[in-house]
Image: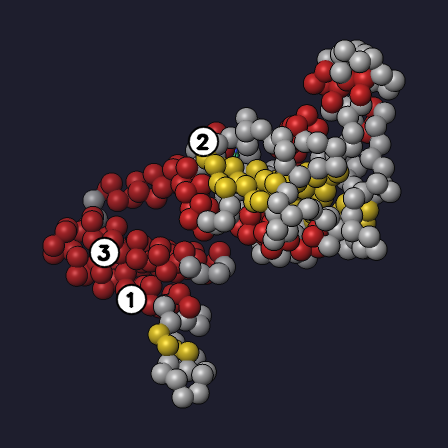
Amino acid sequence: MSIVDASAAGRAPAWRAPWHWPWPLPAAAAWLAAWALFAAARPLAGPGAAALLACAAGALIAWRQPRRWRRAIVGLGFPASALASGAAASWPAWVWLLPLALFVLAYPLRGWRDAPLFPTPAGALDALAAQIALPAGARVLDAGCGIGDGMVALRRAWPHSRIEGVELSPALAWLARRRCRWADVQRGDMWTRSWQGAALVYVFQRPESMARAWDKARAELAPGAWLVSLGFEVPGQAPTLVLAADGVRTLYAWRMQPRQQGCRSDIPQQGCRSDLPQQDCRSVSPQQGFRPDARRHGGRAGSTPVARRR
Ligand SMILES: C[S@@+](CC[C@H](N)C(=O)[O-])C[C@H]1O[C@@H](n2cnc3c(N)ncnc32)[C@H](O)[C@@H]1O
């Protein structure tokens, strides 16, 4: 195991930051750094501020770890060992409120109705890119973009598209903006923000959010645009595409079909239920007379779905 990159013969080995070191060195480095900082800062700043500084150092190294369990081990090492050793007894009580404050900052209570942060795995959308061709510059929206992993996967799938994100949590939106400088990230509510003009809207939410996402997609997306969901189906709506995502989850994609023209109250047309108001009419389900046409999927010619196409 080497913490320097000496692979290039004849060149001076390059220093690599601790988060790039082979596992478990980042954990050991984070814990040592945190304790060293705590010991150095305590006489100057007092135990509370010194503990915060030490936690922040651990969090910085944890943040750069590639897996969630590694982040947890790295970031929680200092506070857990301080608790176990009894050193935490000298910390003022308010220090323990900080994680709670950070949690509430990251997850405004309103966001709890939909999904909390759970990032899209890198490459989870690759199979979809082989099925859906988007023109260069097409607008692609990650509705509830968290810290940007979904946008990274979307960009990898459609590198020439314009990636946008909307996120309820100010802290997560700020982080997403910093991570994905090439994307247009807005802080806001994905249900009130318009989806109009998007060629594809990506959601990774909860099963309970899917009916609402469907209604919004039907109301606001143009015919031919896509609603894509990682992990969760829309109840009662047959997907246009069903693909394996990352070996664990499934990807579902619905291509928006032309709205039933009779929905426009000024143009009476065949097939629209006259008993429904306009907005209800736009979300008429397949069972109510509208069937997605499996042959008009808009996929790339000759491509084969990993799982199935309906
Ligand atoms: C499962 S995470 C997915 C994050 C990101 N899309 C990804 O795939 O990596 C769901 C995200 O949706 C956000 N969220 C929940 N409700 C929201 C809302 N009404 N408007 C905007 N974002 C919301 C949460 O804060 C969380 O970051």
Label 2 secondary element: helix
- Spatial separation of the CA atoms under disc 2 and disc 3: 33 Å
Amino acid type of the residue that numbered disc 1 sits on in the rendered structure:
Leu
- Number of labels in the image equals 3
- Image coordinates for residue 47, horizontal then vertical, percent: 18, 51
Q: Which residue is mark 3?
A: 87
Tell me if mark 2 has few (under 14), some (14-19) or many (20+) residues whose alpha carbon lies within 10 angstroms of its own. few
- Spatial separation of the CA atoms under disc 1 and disc 2: 35 Å
In the displayed structure, 269 sits above or below 154; it is above
Q: Which residue is mark 1?
A: 32
- Image coordinates for residue 84, horizontal then vertical, percent: 30, 57
Amino acid type of the residue that numbered disc 3 sits on in the rendered structure:
Ala
Residue 193 in view: yes
In the picture, the quarter occupied by the C terminus is top right
Q: Nearer the viewer, residue 89 or 94?
A: 94
Nearest to the eye among marks 3 and 1: give it.
1
Query: Residue 109 shows which numbered tag?
Result: 2
